[in-house]
Image (spheres, rainbow, N blue to C red):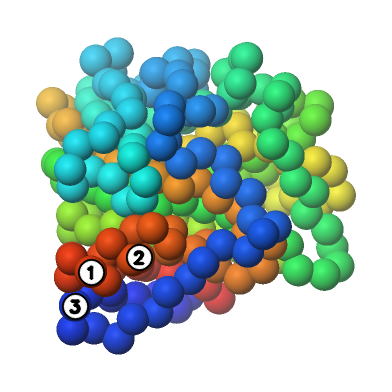
Amino acid sequence: MRAIHWVVGASAVIFLCTAAQADIIFADFNVNEGIFQYAPNFSGTSNVLATSTADRTTAAGEVLEGAGAEKLVLNSGTANPTRCRFLAGVTTAGSPAGQQSFTPTSGGEDGYIGFWYKIAGGTATGMKLGINLDSPANTGATMVGGVLKDVIADGQWHAMEWNLDNLSEWGAVTAIGGSSANLEGSAKTIDSIYFYFIPQPNLSVTVLIDYVVKTDSGHIPIPEPASIGLLLAGIPLVASRRRK
């Protein structure tokens, strides 16, 4: 596994990515929470404390692009491992109904799916992130999950993404089921973003999420408005890429 880090700043080499027309933006949080409107402990497979919260933020320093981002405060008890299945949904949590769908194929290029994240407070030992996808049947057996990946908790924005053309980046959803075999051949919608970490009693970790997107080809983009703003302001941005 190779990690590529892009640093954008006043004195750094600048690499700007802009979204292609075929990219799908599932949530940018610029107007509201969109499909991520449910509490962190809404799912029965989540075991973070009920005091955990998820809300749209517009605060300075907490937004990657546009006018808003999603701010999660995850409070850990003693459950081992601690996990939050942060559900997506339009009318029903974790349901494909009304959601934007896409269909990965075995031929051609399907791009990447992912989001930008920032660990804004607290340190979660061994924290990993994943993304879970639903099929039209909307059952655990027909789900597919992006393999859990380590976070970088340095207070900077990072890209977390999964290659839709690489089955080794997909598998069963931890604690639910499914298989990488479910990835191709049928429509997919976002079931949830997965937060997974080693329990630490009384731990509170703050995670910011922004710009949940699928590309038609290539890596998920640095949102153009933020890139321009960073170029003008000289604020550092670190992007973490993981690929085979």
Residue 72 image point, x, y percent: 30, 31
Other-residue count near label 3 (Cα within 10 Å), few / some / many at <14 / 14–19 / ≥20: some
Which of the pair 6/66 is nearer the observer?
66
Other-residue count near label 1 (Cα within 10 Å), few / some / many at <14 / 14–19 / ≥20: few
Q: Are marks 3 and 2 in contact (CB under 8 Å)?
A: no
> Which one is earlier in the sequence, the residue at label 2 or at label 1?
2
Q: Are marks 2 and 1 in contact (CB under 8 Å)?
A: no
> Which one is earlier in the sequence, the residue at label 1 or at label 3?
3
Numbered badge on residue 18 = none
Other-residue count near label 2 (Cα within 10 Å), few / some / many at <14 / 14–19 / ≥20: many
Residue at x 28%, y 45% (from the top left corner): 63
**Amino acid at circle 1:** Leu
**Amino acid at circle 2:** Ser
Q: Are marks 1 and 3 in contact (CB under 8 Å)?
A: no
Query: Considering the numbered disc 3 on the image, is that residue within a helix, a strand or a loop?
Result: loop
Query: Considering the numbered disc 1 on the image, is that residue within a helix, a strand or a loop?
Result: helix
Residue on which disc 3 sits: 10
Which of the pair 105/9 is nearer the observer?
9
How far separated are the C-alphas under marks 3 and 2? 11 Å
Left or right, residue 20 beside residue 228: right
**Residue 101 is drawn in which quadrant?**
top right
Which of the pair 91/231 is nearer the observer?
231
* Residue 76 is at least partly visible in this image: no
Residue on which disc 1 sits: 232
> Which one is earlier in the sequence, the residue at label 3 or at label 2?
3
Residue on which disc 2 sits: 227
Residue 104 image point, x, y percent: 78, 54
How far separated are the C-alphas under marks 1 and 3? 8 Å
Residue 174 image point, x, y percent: 54, 39
> Closer to us: mark 1 or mark 3?
1
Query: Considering the numbered disc 2 on the image, is that residue within a helix, a strand or a loop?
Result: helix
